[in-house]
Image: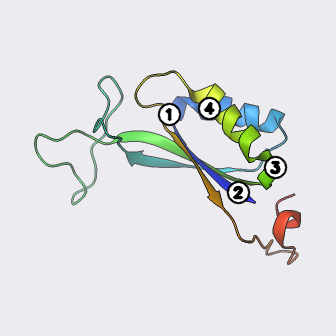
Amino acid sequence: MKEILAVIRPKQVKRTKDVLEQLGFPAFSAVAVLGRGKQKGIAGEIACELPEGLESTPGSSKYVPKRMVSLIVPDEDADLVVKAILKVNQTKQYGDGKVFVCPIDNVVRIRTDEEGEAAIK
């Protein structure tokens, strides 16, 4: 099994969700995150202020709101899901995001004690 973590633009979450559902992967989590890439923020993107103690230092760039989508898929489906996420989110512009593919040793469904791929189906 693989965990796929995609950090994408907030406005792309619905399109990403729709494509994942069409491919048969309706179960995922999406959370709001703040961050920046090597460019230290993107001109023209919405930047936000952070709570006290987390704010940027004077002269540095702001953090950019993103969404982190996470889903667990069988090994054989990981490439398909990654390619779908790339197709929906790739504009070839700074700020498109990143996709991380991580190995998962085990999953346990709390309700039934099912383990492994049975727990994600």
Q: Contact, CB < 8 Å: mark 3 with mark 1?
A: no
Q: For the residues marked 1 and 4, what is the alpha-carbon distance in whole angstroms?
A: 12 Å
Q: Secondary structure at mark 4?
A: helix
Question: Residue at label 2?
Answer: 2
How busy is the neighbourhood of tag 3: few (under 14 within 10 Å), some, or many (20 plus)?
few
Residue 26 rendering spot, x and y as whole percentages: 79, 44
State whether residue 59 is above or below residue 71.
Answer: above
The disc labelled 2 sits on which kind of residue?
Lys
Tell me if mark 2 has few (under 14), some (14-19) or many (20+) residues whose alpha carbon lies within 10 angstroms of its own. some
Please say if 73 is above or below 20: below
Mark 1 highlights which residue?
A: 9
> Position of 30 compared to 9: left or right?
right
Which of pointers 4 and 2 lies earlier in the amino acid sequence? 2
Which of pointers 4 and 3 indicates the residue nearer the eye?
Answer: 3
**Amino acid at pointer 3:** Glu
**Mark nearer the viewer, 1 or 2:** 2
Mark 3 falls on what kind of element? helix
Q: Depth check: give the residue in front, 20 or 11.
A: 20
